[in-house]
Amino acid sequence: MAYDIQPTASHFIDGAYVEDTTGTPIPVICPVSEEEIARVYAATPAIIEKALAAAKRAQVAWAKMTGTERGRVLRKAADMIRERNHDLSVLETNDTGKPLQETLVADATSAADALEYFGGIAGSLTGEHVQLGEDFVYTRREALGVCVGIGAWNYPTQIAAWKGAPALACGNAMVFKPSETTPLCALKVAEILHEAGAPAGIYNVVQGMGEVGHALITDPRVAKVSLTGSVPTGRKVYAAAAEGIRHVTMELGGKSPLVIFDDANLEDAVGGAILGNFYSSGQVCSNGTRVFVQKGIKEAFLKRLSERLAHVKMGDPLDESVNFGPLVNAKQLEIVQGFIAKGVDEGARLVCGGEREGTRGYFLQPTVFADVTDTMTIAREEIFGPVLSVLDFEDEDEVLARANETDFGLAAGVFTNDLSRAHRMVAGFEAGTCYINTYNLAPVEAPFGGSKLSGVGRENSKNAVDHYSEMKSVYVAMTPVEAPF
Ligand code: NAD
């Protein structure tokens, strides 16, 4: 049975769907038909209070359970998500416009991976013992308490789980606010976690815009906020969290370099550039949108890229043969079209694409610019759409310096068959997530996150545990106390 697109209610709090239609209406617009397909309501102060109170209450007992018990719930939720992958993917496609071909393998399944991984390590989270002569210290790894998660619209299910899974594994409760653009799938994550045995109040979802996010993170009951969003929002959320000296994880935007040397395998390099620019119609934070191509391989690269882009199949994203969907909404389409116009105005060479496709749905052709220079707007600002910029370079030192000449630092990639050069390059990249001879993979076992303006902290991997727990040191004296008087 497929899921209804209209959720049972706007929020999921304390183990149940909750509605309050006095909140600001949030229409869910289908990116293909441009029609309203569902409607939720932003959380009112009463809803926010209910969610935080439930989380605060439930967290105490949850943290007292053993890690193995908590992990069992997460792993069960992972299995349920996999069983329901098809329906969840259809819902995600309706919400985001991303092709079902993608959502079937990259969204709910990625959420399941996170729940399975953190469910698996929950029972092995420990402190340590430090012997000090006869005395000793032991450390207790403790939960932070109530954590707030705030999501972007490009990977709604994944983001809900990437934040929820480590938070819950460590014994925290979560109040998650999805992006107002894509409010549907986080509700399913909450529903499934509850069905899998998460006690009421441990994982709550409330809807709303920035004001709701702000109200959540400034509440005294909240110990931590994890945001996935843009740098301007990151600045606001970080500042608001600082007021209460709260823990933060910031997964923000990027303008990542992808460097292709003459000696690279051409097919792999083109494939990497496609994955790093056109997956999810370019709406991926870690995209390698500044593609530096060494002069000797440039024309061959552009030729092969254009040939492979001819295989793009745009259309109804629910059709599994379609591999390129629309942008998420009208605003994003307009923003990306504005960047394309700037690229043309500032003298970049439009190799292909650049136009809106059709008049209904937010479809935009995959777009490639060549002869892009470092100072052009399209080489400096995050576009968050299907626009790839090719920049020329001659040697390694030059390209590394230019690759790092940005305030962002989310990801970076290099394609070369010279092993030493590949490792030299990644050692030099000022970025949190690097790739050699591939691009944009984000397995749950590996830390993911950014340097510089692209973020603070890491998601996924054992690293995430440190961002959702803290150590308490306990000094134990075995000898008499020696006081000066
Ligand atoms: P956004 O910054 O506009 O919004 C992100 C979230 O923050 C939304 O839920 C929004 O409601 C909320 N928000 C806005 N103002 C707030 C405030 N003052 N206080 C609290 N919450 C507030 O981002 P977006 O347009 O939804 O997503 C695109 C951006 O996200 C891009 O910059 C992209 O690079 C980034 N992103 C980063 C990652 C990553 O892991 N690094 C992943 C996906 C997306």
Image (tube, grey):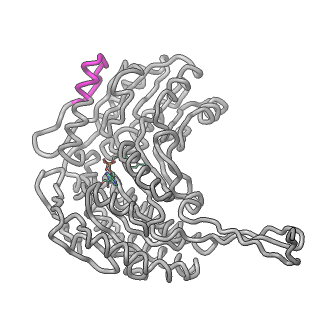
Check the image and report above or below for 52 versus 376: below
Residue 357 included in the magenta stretch of the image: no
The percent position of residue 416, horizontal first and vertical second, equals 56, 30
Q: Is residue 477 left or right of residue 257?
A: right
State the residue lying farthest toward the front. 485
Q: Residue at x 27, y 72 (%)?
A: 47
The percent position of residue 400, horizontal first and vertical second, equals 55, 26
Q: Is residue 65 left or right of residue 187?
A: right
Q: Nearest the camera: 31 or 218?
A: 218
Q: Nearest the camera: 404 or 300?
A: 404
Residue 346 included in the magenta stretch of the image: yes
Q: Nearest the camera: 350 or 59?
A: 59
- Numbered label tally: 0
Q: Residue at x 50, y 41 (%)?
A: 438
Corner quadrant of residue 200: bottom left
Residue 58 seen in the current view: yes
Residue 198 seen in the current view: no
The percent position of residue 136, horizontal first and vertical second, equals 81, 71
Q: Residue at x 38, y 48 (%)?
A: 236
User: Can you say which quadrant of the picture contains the C terminus?
Assistant: bottom right
The magenta stretch spans which residues?
A: 340-354
User: Can you say which quadrant of the picture contains the N terminus?
Assistant: bottom left
The percent position of residue 204, horizontal first and vertical second, equals 35, 72
